[in-house]
Amino acid sequence: MMTCQQLIDFLSDYLDGKLPLSQRVAFELHLTLCRDCRAYLHNYKTAIEASRSAFDAPADSLKEVIPEDLVSAILKARQSEQS
Amino acid sequence: MDQDAPPTHSDLELLASLRAGEDAAFETLVRRYGGRMLSVAKRFLSNEADAHDAVQEAFLSAFKALASFDGRAQLGTWLHRIVVNAALMKLRTKSRHPELSIDDLLPKFKADGHQEAPCSRWNAPPVADMERAETQQLIREHINKLPESYRTVLLLRDIEELDTDVVAQILDLNPGTVKVRLHRARQALRTLLDPLFGGKP
Ligand SMILES: [Zn+2]
């Protein structure tokens, strides 16, 4: 029987659909029998979704205003590269 | 229509003025996209001054590459890619801080291979809740705690959504190493988010 450790090692391949059939069967059998691993899989997927959604909102990145001194530094650097 | 989003035709006009070398157009470009680019640079670079340098480098390379920008991509998308590259260059030239050990953030197992501590299922917040600005901010802070070599892979794979092979090429790593680092980064993030989502300190 697959252990929790092996299951967690295979997690990313499982989610990518890249586990060979025999391993996938063992993976899913372990899942049905192990509550901790079901929770782990759920939390792992949620962590991925959470990281994606953390950068989702364009509203948030639009709020970031470029500091004036950086604007002038960039424009000055452009001038000096041209001359 | 979102007021903040400049209509595309004004980007096209801007591009024409940039190519004509009008000084004012460069300032408009920097003001229009600088904030967004700075927030992208800060994902990769925790040091404020480094993020500023990356944005400056990005704009200078963009100015030089204007002639080769074919206008099929959105200006914003093109600049996004340039600033990600500039931030990665900056990371590469920096002397590395001693990194946190990722091992402390990975799950522990008993001798028989079972999880050492019971794992309890998160009550994931509903999406609307997850997208609240404060929650997003908290999650970003936790991502920033990841050791840099893992955080960079997580950002490029899960946020920038680049393929394993592309990331391997950019970072000069084996695809296998990229896969291992991504998996460890996600596991470590799971550990870091546990108090937030698991509802236990
Ligand atoms: Zn298990």
Image (cartoon, rainbow, N blue to C red):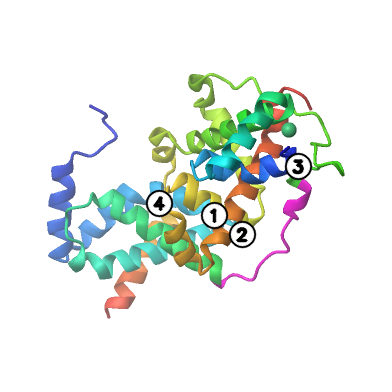
Secondary element at tag 4: helix
State which image quarter holds ligand 1: top right
Horizontal side of B80 relative to B23 (left or right) equals right
Location of residue B165 in the rendering, given as x and y in whole percent from the top left corner: 44, 60
Q: Earlier in the sequence, mark 3 or mark 1?
A: 3
Mark 3, residue position? B107
The label shown at residue B37 is: 4
Left of B91 or right of it: where is B160? left
Q: Main secondary structure of the magenta part?
A: loop
Q: Earlier in the sequence, mark 2 or mark 3?
A: 3
Q: How busy is the neighbourhood of tag 1: few (under 14 within 10 Å), some, or many (20 plus)?
A: many
Image point (62%, 57%), residue name: B148
> Measured from the top left, where is residue B74 in percent x and y?
23, 49
Mark 4 → mark 2, Cα distance in angstroms: 21 Å
* Magenta-highlighted residues: B93-104
Q: Does mark 3 fall on the same chain as mark 2?
A: yes
In this figure, which residue is indicated by the disc labeled 2?
B149
Chain to which the residue tagged by mark 3 belongs: B
Amino acid on which the number 2 mark rests in the picture? Ser
**Is residue B42 placed above or below A30 in the rendered structure?**
below
| Residue B193, picture quadrant | top right
Up the image or down, B196 lies above or below B163; here it is above
Query: Mark 2 and mark 1 in contact (Cβ < 8 Å)?
Result: yes
Give the secondary structure at mark 1: helix
Crowd tier of the residue under label 2, counting other residues whose Cα lies within 10 Å: few below 14, some 14–19, many 20 or above: some
Dot 4 crowding, Cα within 10 Å, few <14, some 14–19, many 20+: many
The mark closer to the camera, 3 or 1, is: 3
Q: Report helix, strand or loop for mark 3.
A: loop
